[in-house]
Amino acid sequence: MNLLSATNLAHSFEYELFRDVTLELNAQESIAIIGMSGSGKSTLLHILSTLLVPQKGTVLLFGDAIQSMSKKRLSLIKRHDLGLIFQSHYLFNGFSAYENLEVSELLSGEKIEDSLLEALHIKEPIHQKVTQLSGGQQQRVSIARVLTKKPRIIFADEPTGNLDKKTADEVMGLFFDYCKSNNAGMILVTHDNDLAHQCDKVFQLKDKILHQIK
């Protein structure tokens, strides 16, 4: 099942970032995008995840073009079907970790699962204030917040940047398991080639062109 299709995407700021970018994401599939800093990886991810409108080209989510969707439908897709994870955790600092997850539970209608908290090693400190948690714990809470809503596509921009290698590998394993068991897909942006090659497909953004290398 096709989850996302991008065709002939191009984008520029003061200079051209990329052109003619085409890729597809299917259910139970993971894609990594690598490239040097400033190559446009994060911008591409922002376009694919609807945070940015492409200057050229089209993006289809679940078979329908983003540009032709009503604001209401796109808003519902963002709320229920897309999960965005960044290197910065973007948690609500005045809340406890659990209250952050409750926001996701409330918006999505999905339940917080103890098994997810255990897998991310955050069950013990879950009722502490976000500001009392380590950077790694905060990042794992942000990952739990996204997975709680049961998204159909995970968009992850350096999601393990604040984690040690062992925890990073565990988190990646959790993502892969999630995609398989929930018929979901993942697009990962990373500088880590080893991490990237754990994914089903690997693309490199180089010289303004997206090349598939795996």
Image: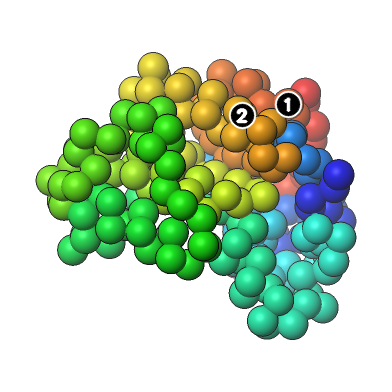
Residue at the left extreme? Answer: 132
Q: CA distance from mark 2 to mark 1?
A: 10 Å
Q: Residue at x 36, y 54 (%)?
A: 101
Q: Tell me if 47 is positioned left or right of 107 in this view.
A: right
- Pick whichever, 119 or 171, lies toward us: 119
Label for residue 200? 1
Q: Amino acid at mark 1?
A: Asp
Q: How many marks?
A: 2
Residue 126: quarter of image: top left
Name the mark on residue 176: 2
Front in this rendered view, residue 212 or 165: 165
Is residue 185 something that shows in the picture?
Answer: no
Q: Looking at the picture, does residue 210 appear above or below residue 66?
A: above
Q: Quadrant of the C terminus?
A: top right
Q: Is residue 182 left or right of residue 149?
A: right
Which colouring convention does the figure follow? rainbow
Q: What SS does tag 1 mark?
A: loop
